[in-house]
Image: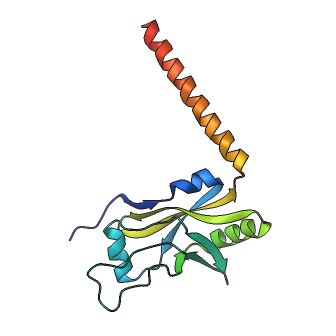
Amino acid sequence: MPRERGEKVVATNRKARHDYTIEDTFEAGLVLTGTEVKSLRAGRASLVDGYGYIDGGEAWLDAVHIPEFNQGSWNNHPVRRKRKMLLHKHEILKIHNKVKEGGYTLVPLRLYFSDGKAKVELAVAKGKREYDKRQTLRERTDKREADRAMGTHRNLGD
């Protein structure tokens, strides 16, 4: 059987970029059971309520929803269990120091397979206030309108 190549995205947390200001991102491996991997390969997962934390020098991912595998038997996994993340020690220390500062949290952005291995993209993020969200939305709208105006201006000049 040939090895898997490339990247296959299973789930993304689109709301995270809306609710948080992303400071730094990390890629972490996941310790999973067999039925969890099979559910992920079927493209079934949700990162909506997920969060990460550091406990005892280890990184953990909690509240990520990976549904039970349909053909699984009595040894199916719990749907929302905490899962260990695989990171280098210096990355764990960097994350721990940033989160300990206060105001920062560890949010999963993407769950994907990279060359056949399950990975999660984590972000050290700071929560946005309501007015920050409105300002970001306004800036995005203004940029889109400016690009649209520049595009029509270019077409008229031809």
Q: Is residue 97 left or right of residue 55?
A: right
In the orientation shown, which residue stands out farthest toward the right? 101
Q: How many marks?
A: 0
Identify the residue at horizontal 55%, vertical 26% (top origin): 145
Q: Quadrant of residue 103?
A: bottom right
Question: Looking at this rendering, what residue extends furthest in the left direction?
Answer: 1
Out of 60 and 79, give the one closest to the viewer.
79
As drawn, which residue projects farthest toward the bottom? 74
Check the picture and name the quadrant holding the N terminus: bottom left
> Residue 51: x and y, percent?
59, 70
Q: How is the image coloured?
A: rainbow
The residue located at (53%, 79%) in the rendering is 84
Q: Name the spot of residue 26 as percent of width and height, x first.
A: 57, 62
Q: Is residue 83 above or below residue 107?
A: below
- Taking depth in this image into account, of 49 and 147 the one nearest to the observer is 49
Q: Residue at x 70, y 53 (%)?
A: 128
Rendering coords of residue 29 (x, y %) = 49, 71
In the image, taking residue 59 as reference, residue 127 lies left or right, namely right
